[in-house]
Image (cartoon, rainbow, N blue to C red):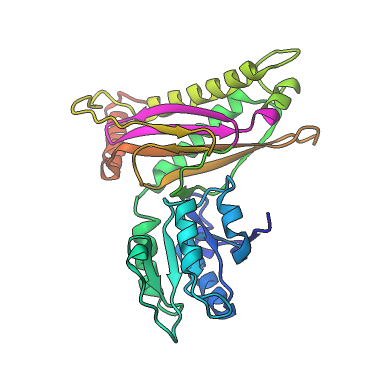
């Protein structure tokens, strides 16, 4: 796949708990690329540059994204209507941001009016910033929550695997619903301020190799997919238990529950929770320091489609602090 990283590092993502958003970029204008590079560095966007003839191939792969940036016209001046329609048909959940041709504004047909989330010019920073905030960062994830989730999960990873180097990438948000790999676990998560699901996604073969290499708690001479399922299930249970101990309190309500169907299409590696809200994602890499085993990538995704009230998150912190102050809880 001839996809290159468009932005290698964010000046605004030096804080390891900042959240980024991964987007696909097709742009033939050199000045447009420079402007987007500067804009992305200011708005926590991580861009992957792709050529026009490879866009659909990339979109049909398992790469997860939050949006797509394309110019109104190609390098020859021809309008990209057909390309935009093909993008929407391939990944309809992804917002498409269109850079307008400054010399020839185009009157879009009705079929495109509901597809485009916004038109921008390359020197209009405030306009594109508003569009990005509306369609990519529309859900606020408190930095304290992201940091805690990562630490709770790393604790579980270290307990489930042994003798491996475990790293985690910068947290990011996605708008699509792509499933990575063949392994998939789904756990409900609930507190008095959130309700939804956690997913763990990975590939079977590398996990099998790690079990064979005696890097887990499972002892098996010839491990099978059932042993792989056990590893992923135990890891999910430990993360869920850490989440429950940290965030679930006696005042978690069970009234007025809302349920929505979860739709899974295995052929297309697609899952829907009945919501278009962006998902919070973390990518963990487990590496063998001796280099004998292939690295494992495990994607952790959170979708709080049933309830999300981040304004109550600080109340949870205050509640814990009050319990410490009263002596009900004691810090080590």
User: Quarter of the image containing the C terminus?
Assistant: top left
Could you say which quadrant of the image residue 95 lies in? Answer: bottom left
Left or right relative to 62: residue 163: right
* In the depicted structure, whether residue 236 falls above or below residue 173: above
The residue positioned 43% from the left and 77% from the top of the image is 100
Quadrant in which the N terminus is drawn: bottom right
Please provide percent x and percent y for residue 70. 50, 68
Residue 186 highlighted magenta (yes or no): yes
Residue 310: x %, y % from top left: 30, 44
- Nearer the observer, 329 or 80: 80
Looking at the picture, tell me which residue is in the foreground, 267 or 225: 267
- Residue positioned 38% across, 64% down in the render: 116
Q: Is residue 148 left or right of residue 299?
A: left
- Residue located farthest toward the bottom when viewing the structure as drawn: 103
Q: Is residue 152 left or right of residue 223?
A: left
Residue range in magenta is 181-206
Which of the two residues, 117 or 33, is positioned nearer the viewer here?
A: 117
Name, please, the residue furthest toward the left. 256
**How many numbered markers are drawn?**
0
- Identify the residue at image location x=34%, y=66%: 130
**Residue 18 visible in this rendered orientation of the protein:** no
Q: Position of residue 124 (x, y in %)?
A: 40, 78
What predominant SS class does the magenta segment belong to? Answer: strand
Q: Is residue 64 above or below residue 208?
A: below
* Residue 120 showing in the rendered view: yes
Side of 137 where 322 appears, left or right: left
Query: Any magenta on residue 185?
Result: yes
User: Where does the image place residue 223, in percent across and percent down from the top left?
Assistant: 70, 16
């Amino acid at each position: 796949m001839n996809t290159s990283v468009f932005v290698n590092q964010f000046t605004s993502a030096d804080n390891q708990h900042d959240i980024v958003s991964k987007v696909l970029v097709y742009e033939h204008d050199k000045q447009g690329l420079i402007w987007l590079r500067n804009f992305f560095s200011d708005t926590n966007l991580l861009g992957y540059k792709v050529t026009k003839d490879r866009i659909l191939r990339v979109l049909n792969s398992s790469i997860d994204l939050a949006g797509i940036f394309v110019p109104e016209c190609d390098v020859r001046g021809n309008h990209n209507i057909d390309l935009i329609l093909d993008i929407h048909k391939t990944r309809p959940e992804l917002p498409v941001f269109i850079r307008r041709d400054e010399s020839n504004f185009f009157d879009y047909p009705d079929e495109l009016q509901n597809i485009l989330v916004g038109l921008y010019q390359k020197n209009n920073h405030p306009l594109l910033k508003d569009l990005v905030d509306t369609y990519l960062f529309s859900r606020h994830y408190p930095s304290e929550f992201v940091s805690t989730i990562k630490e709770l999960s790393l604790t579980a990873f270290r307990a489930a695997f042994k003798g491996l180097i475990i790293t985690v990438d910068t947290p990011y948000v996605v708008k699509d619903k792509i499933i990575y790999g063949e392994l998939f676990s789904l756990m409900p998560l609930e507190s008095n301020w959130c309700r939804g699901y956690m997913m763990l996604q990975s590939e079977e073969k590398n996990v099998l190799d790690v079990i064979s290499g005696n890097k887990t708690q499972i002892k098996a001479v010839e491990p099978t997919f059932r042993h792989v399922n056990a590893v992923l299930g135990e890891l999910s249970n430990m993360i869920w238990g850490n989440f429950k101990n940290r965030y679930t309190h006696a005042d978690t309500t069970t009234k007025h529950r809302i349920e929505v169907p979860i739709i899974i299409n295995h052929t297309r590696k697609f899952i829907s929770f009945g919501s278009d809200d962006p998902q919070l994602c973390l990518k963990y890499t487990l590496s063998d320091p001796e280099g004998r085993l292939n690295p494992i990538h495990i994607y952790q995704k959170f979708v709080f489609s049933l309830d999300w009230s981040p304004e109550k998150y600080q109340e949870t912190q205050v509640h814990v602090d009050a319990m410490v102050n009263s002596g009900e809880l004691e810090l080590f």
